[in-house]
Amino acid sequence: MGNTTISALIRHILLVVIWLALWRLSVFNEYAPHASIWFPPAGFTFACFLLLRWYAAPAMLLSCLLSTVWESFLFNDGRSTQELIQAGTLFAIMHCGVYGVSANYLRSFIDRISHQNLYQPVMRFLLVAASSSLVMSSVGIMVLYDGVHLPTLVQSWLAWWIGDMSGLLVLVPVFIGLVNRIYPRQGLLFALRYEPSGRSDYLLFAAKLAITSTLLIAVALATNYSGSAEVASLVFFIALPQMWIVHTESPMRVAVSVALFSFLAALLVSLLQMGEQAYIFQVAISVVASAAYFTMAVPALVSHNQALYKEVRTDYLSQTVMRQHFIKLAEQNLKHASRYNFETALLLFDIDNFKQINDQYGHLIGDEVLQKFARMVKSKIRESDIIGRFGGDEFMLLLPQTSLQSAYKVAESIRCGMLELKISNPDVKPSCSVGAAAMTRESGFKGAFEEADQALLQAKRGGRNRTTLNSTG
């Protein structure tokens, strides 16, 4: 018990040390009094609450108090101890309250969604980051700096908002990985699909970072030389090589590249003292980060939509095409076949005595028969052929560019393959009956289906376990 308490205390102290180090970094990168191009502690606080929920509150509150004292010491503002405690407490409550509530809201949302969907948490994160930093900057300016009487109200509020928002957008993904190292957790990181990439080509990744950094330095130097806002706006084009990284690297490397871009931008603005153009670089950090994460999320959305598309058109048990979608595909194929004068055949399958199998051996054995039948059929047909489940124990097979005689051979191959299926219960010896018909422009799908259904009925009346062609074929 004692070791657990000490370990928890050490971890909290480590969080405080990291928070203060990040706060000092933001002070170092100030381009105007109390105006930093970004505010990393905001991102760190958000990440801590996101992973640890309110368990992170003591460390974050203490960090805010200590930073207030440290700030007073740096600027020698002459405030008394009581004033420092009051100001620090107020700042701590606002900072932890706004970002704590926002992060916990986002965490609750992430916990409810599919772990395979990256798009939703990314979009919600972007919205939460923008709104929570807006609330924090507005409240902070009004309460801590008497914003109503502040001569530079708009400029100070805008600098605070964009600085906090940049810290959130850019650094939260990296800080998630950092905090997860200190407090190992799995659920959230898996939901964000934050696993490392399988690639190990670090030299190529380093080259991409070097290209992005070189372009950023070039823009910053050109801006400093010209003093032109138009030249500074070229920084937005660095989103292009950043997208290259997004499309070719893992999510963690994307987060690292965005963090490096933002740090270098903040450092250049501070070193070159680009006060007038600082806002452009500040906005560029947020835009590049948002574009990177949005671009990273879009393929996940497309993949998710494709999965949904497949789900609503695929029979879950047999993993074959569902009835309505099969009919649609058959009609599309018929138009193509009519245009080029191709033959098309339709096969109907019925599992013999399937109700008896369910009644005597159970539905699980019946499901196994259907699944293994579907897999066996897929192993014997072409990629262009379409297997669908009509319902119950009946299946349909569309054979494009296939004559009725060739379809008969395919049907016989499948019928014989059915006899060789190995079911977990050795007493089950399944077989199937098959009806075949040609599908033409005149018959259409409906007519071909009726003819194949009649042929199937003849096969069942003839003793089952056989293939029958329709009478007109």
Image (spheres, grey):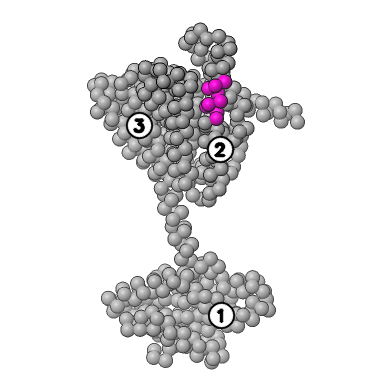
Q: Is residue 123 left or right of residue 106?
A: left
Q: Which residue is disc 1 drawn over?
A: 351
Q: Which mark is residue 160?
A: none
Relative image position of residue 213 (x, y in whole percent): 36, 30
Within-10-Å neighbours for mark 2: few <14, some 14–19, many 20+: some
Q: Is residue 142 magenta?
A: no
- Residue beneath the point at 40% across and 29% down: 162
Which residue corresponds to the image point at 44% horizontal and 39% vertical from the top-left? 127
**Residue occupying image coordinates x 55% and y 28%:** 96
Numbered disc in front, either 2 or 3: 2
Q: Nearer the viewer, mark 2 or mark 1?
A: 2
Question: Mark 2 vs mark 3: which is more N-terminal?
Answer: 2
Provide the residue designation for mark 3.
Answer: 284
Write down the quadrant of residue 460 in the picture: bottom right
Task: Read off the magenta span.
Answer: 89-97
Amino acid type of the residue that numbered disc 3 sits on in the rendered structure: Ala
Say what amino acid the circle numbered 2 marks.
Asn
Vertical side of 318 occupied by 279: above or below: above
Disc 1 and disc 3: Cα gap in Å? Answer: 64 Å
Q: Quadrant of residue 261?
A: top left
Q: Quadrant of the C terminus?
A: bottom left
User: Which residue is label 2 attached to?
Assistant: 104
Q: Secondary structure at mark 1?
A: strand
**Helix, strand, or loop for circle 3?**
helix
Closest to the observer: 443 or 455?
443
Q: Secondary structure at mark 2?
A: helix
Look at the image and tell me in which quarter the N terminus lies.
top right
Decide which of tag 2 and tag 1 comes sooner along the chain: 2
